[in-house]
């Protein structure tokens, strides 16, 4: 039986590089690109097939920023497959990012300079908005839409005899101080991205607590700093091109400048090859690239505990109940 691998946000950046790498490693898998734009998904499928002509690649429309679309996409996946072996929860956004030049210059002359480059801590703010579902857009896209997708696909993911895997693209930008349980959607602040990635980490831990017994395992990854549409949205591409020599130099001091989507996907591919029972649910698996451009994976303990992850999970369950009331069959 072919292993079924579903990847959200598969049409560009890290998601697309992951698909290329998975097919290079094993062209017997069935790969399903879960994307919001069918046109961009078709283009990605063509690119994958041109480098792997015998590959088995399908597409499904899923906009993780819309509950209606997630429910429709999950329905199609449920009709199409009996089991999903790997679900990569990779789609993500950072809308309207602003870099604080003041914080950057201050950080350059502080002892935290290396960690500033590795995490972007304190440098970025975003302007979030509210979706048609009445949820914060960054939270719904990066976290909650994916959570609903998992719940809808539960029968395909929970098989004791053959464990299935959830692999989230989180970030080193996930930060406890940006997250608050009383405002877990981050309605109030301006660090919705950091908050959503911390929420991702909490959710992954809670999912392990609840689902390992049913044969479902969740892991989180940090791909490092990767040049993708997301980063080109932070600063224009000419800026990144200009400072590329500086970026290679910074690589001598931090292993988090993976830069290419191929390198950024390192930990996502590595996890594909690991036995889930051997993984640490409290670790984030970082894609790293050395000064000599060698890629490797480093697990680092996350700044969280079981109690906070379970408290967040209760909030998510409550929100799920509220949202589902609006989507009873016939209503959607
Ligand atoms: N680049 C970096 O340095 C880092 C990235 N990450 C994370 O990596 C992940 C991938 O991002 P990256 O490859 O960098 O950036 P890209 O913008 O290239 O990829 C993001 C992907 O997510 C998709 N997407 C966005 N919103 C939705 C939605 N509502 N429904 C379905 N798909 C959606 C995009 O589709 P579309 O083309 O239609 O917009 C695109 O395919 C994200 O979760 C990001 O937060 C984490 C750490 C660092
Ligand atoms: C000289 C130089 C490299 C300047 C760029 C400064 C900043 C714009 C970057 C420094 C660290 C970067 C970073 C990210 C965005 C750009 C920086 C703040 C991310 C937040 C992008 C998205 C993530 O998920 C994590 C990244 C961490 C590092």
Image (tube, helix red, strand yellow):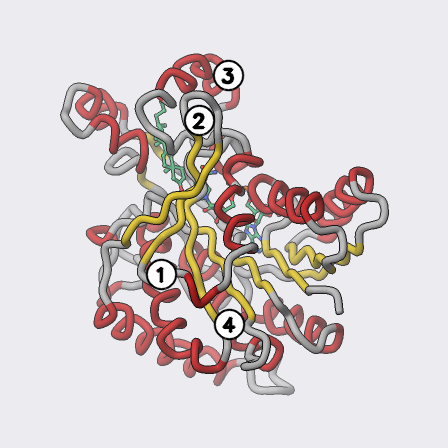
Residue 235 - label: 2
Q: Does the residue at mark 2 contact the one at mark 3 (Cβ under 8 Å)?
A: no
Q: Is label 2 within 8 A of ligand 2 (CB to nearest ligand atom)?
A: yes
Give the mark nearest the N terminus, 2 or 1: 2
Give the mark nearest the N terminus, 2 or 3: 2
Assess disc 4: are there few (<14), some (14-19) or many (≥20) residues with their C-alpha within 10 Å of its C-alpha: many
Residue 181 - label: none
According to the image, label 1 marks what residue? 280
Q: Quadrant of the N terminus?
A: bottom right
> What residue do we see at 25% from left, 70% from top?
306
- Between label 4 and label 2, give the one nearer the viewer: 4
Above or below for 264 versus 332: above
**CA distance separating discs 1 and 3:** 37 Å
> Which is nearer the eye, 63 or 251?
251
| x and y percentages locating residue 317 in the rendered image | 38, 79
- Between label 1 and label 4, give the one nearer the viewer: 1
**CA distance separating discs 4 and 2:** 32 Å
Q: Does the residue at mark 1 contact the one at mark 3 (Cβ under 8 Å)?
A: no
> What residue do we see at 58% from left, 39% from top?
13
Assess disc 2: are there few (<14), some (14-19) or many (≥20) residues with their C-alpha within 10 Å of its C-alpha: few
Please, what secondary structure does the residue beneath circle 1 have?
loop
**CA distance separating discs 1 and 4:** 24 Å
According to the image, label 3 marks what residue? 241
> Which is nearer the eye, 19 or 190?
19
Q: How many callouts does the rendering have?
A: 4
Give the mark nearest the N terminus, 4 or 3: 4
Residue 148 - label: 4
């Amino acid at each position: 039986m072919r292993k079924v691998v579903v990847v959200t946000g598969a049409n560009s950046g890290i998601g697309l590089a992951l698909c290329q790498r998975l097919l290079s490693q094993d062209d017997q898998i069935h790969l399903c690109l879960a994307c919001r734009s069918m046109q961009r998904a078709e283009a990605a499928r063509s690119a994958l097939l041109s480098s792997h002509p015998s590959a088995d690649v399908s597409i499904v429309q899923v906009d993780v920023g819309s509950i209606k679309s997630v429910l429709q996409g999950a329905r199609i996946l449920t009709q199409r497959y009996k089991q999903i072996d790997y679900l990569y929860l990779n789609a993500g956004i950072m809308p309207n990012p602003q870099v604080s030049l003041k914080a950057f210059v201050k950080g350059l002359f502080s002892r935290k300079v290396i960690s500033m480059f590795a995490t972007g801590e304190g440098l970025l703010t975003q302007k979030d908005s509210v979706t048609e579902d009445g949820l914060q857009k960054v939270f719904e896209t990066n976290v909650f839409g994916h959570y609903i997708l998992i719940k809808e696909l539960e029968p395909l993911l929970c098989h004791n005899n053959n464990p299935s895997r959830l692999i989230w693209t989180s970030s080193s930008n996930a930060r406890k101080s940006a997250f608050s349980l009383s405002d877990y959607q981050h309605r109030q602040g301006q660090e919705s991205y950091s908050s959503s990635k911390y929420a991702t980490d909490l959710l992954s831990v809670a999912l392990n607590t609840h689902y390992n017994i049913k044969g479902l395992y969740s892991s989180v990854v940090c791909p490092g700093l990767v040049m993708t549409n997301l980063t080109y949205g932070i600063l224009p591409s000419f800026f990144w091109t200009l400072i590329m020599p500086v970026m290679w130099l910074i690589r001598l001091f931090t292993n988090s400048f993976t830069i290419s989507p191929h390198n950024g996907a390192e930990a996502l591919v590595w996890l594909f090859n690991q036995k889930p029972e051997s993984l640490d649910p409290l670790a984030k698996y970082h894609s790293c690239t050395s000064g000599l451009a060698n890629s490797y994976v480093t697990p680092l303990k996350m700044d969280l505990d079981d109690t906070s992850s379970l408290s967040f999970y209760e909030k998510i369950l409550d929100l799920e109940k509220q949202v589902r009331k609006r989507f009873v069959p016939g209503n959607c």
